[in-house]
Image: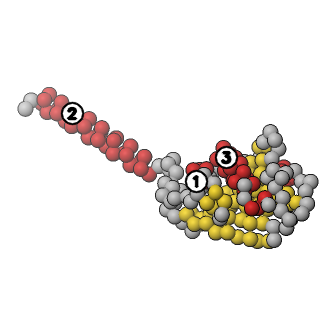
């Protein structure tokens, strides 16, 4: 083989090695990149602590992981909280809480974390951010156990990394409407 033929062969092999190395590097970087959110390998039930809601709306407000568990908590006489945990870590809380009549949704939202500077809906029933929201049920939602009180719904993410105002708004509105159709509203 001539010197020029040998030189061309080395350049060709060098280019093949460079292209292969670049492809391998790109594959490695994409596999290791933190850009892709963790896979949501769990199934969200249609009923969360007795309230039926579209699982896709719930899943959009959850973090990735392998398993999902729910637990009902009643911290006081007027609050019911549905806590969702992914892989054993609390990531989302959906609450029903009775507040004295006369409060606005904006005022009630101040009692919940991550609602500061939230978006107020046109009808002033909902306040939400990318991490939390508060919704007021319809005026006809009354219960004899809670006279002169209004029922509010709170959706709160818990250190999950979720920050999606559209997902929180959709879940908040759907969950509020679902609660309005239950015995909670007498």
Of the numbered discs 1 and 3, the one sitting upstream in the chain is: 1
Q: Nearer the viewer, residue 64 or 104?
A: 104
Residue at image location 14% in from the left, 33% down from the top: 6
Of the numbered discs 2 and 3, the one sitting upstream in the chain is: 2
Distance from Cα at disc 2 to Cα at disc 1: 55 Å
Residue 6 lies, with reference to residue 46, above or below; the image says above
Residue 4 lies, with reference to residue 22, above or below; the image says above
Quadrant of the image occupied by residue 93: bottom right
Q: Which residue is mark 2?
A: 12
Distance from Cα at disc 1 to Cα at disc 3: 12 Å
Residue 86 visible here: yes
SS assignment at label 2: helix
Q: Which residue is mark 3?
A: 170
Q: Which residue is mark 1?
A: 55
Of the numbered discs 2 and 1, the one sitting upstream in the chain is: 2
Q: Quadrant of the N terminus?
A: top left
Q: Nearer the viewer, residue 27 or 176?
A: 176
On the image, the x and y values in percent for residue 76 come to 80, 71
Residue at image location 63% in from the left, 54% down from the top: 53
Q: Give left or right: position of 72 versus 16.
A: right
Do the numbered discs 2 and 1 sit on residues whose CB atoms are within 8 Å? no
């Amino acid at each position: 083989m001539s010197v020029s033929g040998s030189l061309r062969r080395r350049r060709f092999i060098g280019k093949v090695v460079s292209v292969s190395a670049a492809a391998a590097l790109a594959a490695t970087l994409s596999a290791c990149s933190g850009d892709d959110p963790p896979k949501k390998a769990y199934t969200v039930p249609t009923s969360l602590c007795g309230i039926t809601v579209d699982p896709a709306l719930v899943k959009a407000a959850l973090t990735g992981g392998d398993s999902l568990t729910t637990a009902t908590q009643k911290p006081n006489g007027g609050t019911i909280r549905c806590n969702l945990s992914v892989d054993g870590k609390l990531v989302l809380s959906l609450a029903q809480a009775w507040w004295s009549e006369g409060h606005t949704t904006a005022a009630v939202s101040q009692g919940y974390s991550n609602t500061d500077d939230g978006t107020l809906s046109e009808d002033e029933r909902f306040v939400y951010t990318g991490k939390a929201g508060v919704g007021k049920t319809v005026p006809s939602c009354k219960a004899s156990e809670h006279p002169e009180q209004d029922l509010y719904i709170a959706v709160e993410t818990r250190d999950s990394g979720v920050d999606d105002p559209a997902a929180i708004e959709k879940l908040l509105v759907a969950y509020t409407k679902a609660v309005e159709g239950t015995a909670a509203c007498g």
